[in-house]
Image (cartoon, rainbow, N blue to C red):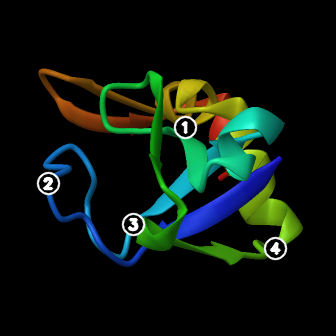
């Protein structure tokens, strides 16, 4: 799994500057100068490779990407009484 920071988004309103995106392997797209990126819609699309700079993320950050938001949503539940910590949060 690779990650890249968006450094340019001219004509691509669905990309946010300075945001880290997950990049999927696509050798054909790479030969044409594109990256296959999962954008704000949650779908993967081709964008010019010049819009991104690859970055190395620490292991903890990579794991956060692979678990999505599922783990975090179980840690903190919001109800009428306000936020409530659950056993999954460990605190």
Looking at the image, is mark 3 or mark 2 earlier in the sequence? 2
Quarter location, residue 89: top right
Q: Which element is circle 2 on? A: loop
Q: Is residue 10 above or below residue 71?
A: below
Pick whichever, 41 or 29, lies toward us. 29
In x, y percent, where is residue 38?
Answer: 50, 36
Callout in the foreground (3, 4): 3
Looking at the image, is mark 4 or mark 2 earlier in the sequence? 2
Separation (CA) of disc 3 from disc 4: 16 Å
Separation (CA) of disc 3 from disc 2: 16 Å
Which residue carries the number 2 mark?
A: 11
Q: Are marks 3 and 1 in contact (CB under 8 Å)?
A: no
Looking at the image, is mark 3 or mark 4 earlier in the sequence? 3
Q: Which mark is residue 19?
A: 3
Q: Residue pushed farthest front? A: 32
Which residue carries the number 4 mark?
A: 58
Separation (CA) of disc 4 from disc 2: 31 Å
């Amino acid at each position: 799994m690779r990650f890249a920071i968006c450094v340019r988004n001219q004509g691509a309103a669905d990309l946010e500057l300075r945001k880290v995106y997950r990049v999927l392997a696509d050798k054909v797209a790479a030969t044409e100068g594109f990256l296959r990126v999962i954008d704000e819609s949650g779908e993967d699309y081709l964008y010019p490779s010049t819009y991104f700079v690859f970055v190395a993320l620490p292991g903890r950050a990579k794991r956060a990407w692979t678990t999505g938001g599922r783990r975090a949503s179980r840690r903190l539940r919001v109800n009428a009484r306000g936020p409530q910590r659950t056993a999954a949060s460990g605190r």
